[in-house]
């Protein structure tokens, strides 16, 4: 993500919304469909050109499976980012076949610490 010190809160929230969407594996069109919006609305939101209502933040958090507090800049960037990454990893691991999970765990054990 860009240097957040020079960005407005709206731009920071927009960045987090885009990051959450990407981590969730959704396209702008898919996100718009789930939210009942048009894709250009998602583009404008992610560019920081359109305000987002409290209700929309809640909907975004639900479809992206992230905390509203993270989207609203209420959590520390480093800890929150790592927590979001862990959630994404857990979600993806849940989709794996048991034999693939065994292989992955084996690889993780041999990686340097």
Image (tube, rainbow, N blue to C red):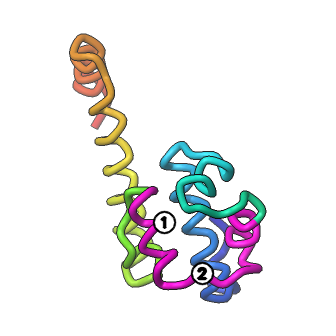
Residue under label 1, please give it: 60
Q: Nearer the viewer, residue 6 or 112?
A: 6
Q: Nearer the viewer, residue 27 or 97?
A: 27
> Which residue lies at the image location 48% right of the left edge and 75% below the top edge?
57
- Image vertical order of residue 103 relative to residue 23, above or below: above
> Which residue lies at the image location 45% right of the left edge and 56% below the top edge?
64
Q: SS at mark 1?
A: helix
Residue under label 2, please give it: 52
Look at the numbered discs 1 and 2 and tell me whether their residues touch, using CB distance below 8 Å.
yes
Q: Nearer the viewer, residue 27 or 35?
A: 35
Q: Position of residue 76 (x, y in %)?
A: 39, 78
Q: Position of residue 14 (x, y in %)?
A: 63, 73
Badge 1: residue crowd in 10 Å (few <14, some 14–19, many ≥20): many
Assess whether residue 54 is covered by the magenta stretch. Answer: yes
Residue 108, picture quadrant: top left
Q: Position of residue 48 (x, y in %)?
A: 71, 78
Q: Which residues are magenta?
A: 41-63
């Amino acid at each position: 993500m860009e240097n957040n010190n020079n960005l407005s809160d709206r731009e920071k929230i927009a960045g987090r919304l885009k990051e959450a969407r990407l981590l969730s594996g959704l396209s702008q069109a898919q996100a718009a469909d789930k939210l009942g919006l048009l894709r250009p609305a998602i583009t404008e939101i992610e560019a920081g050109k359109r305000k987002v209502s409290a209700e929309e933040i809640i909907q975004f958090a639900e479809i992206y499976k992230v905390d509203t507090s993270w989207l609203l800049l209420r959590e520390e960037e480093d800890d929150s980012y790592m927590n979001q990454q862990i959630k994404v990893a857990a979600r993806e691991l849940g989709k794996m076949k048991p034999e693939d999970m065994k292989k992955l765990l084996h690889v993780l054990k041999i990686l340097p610490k």
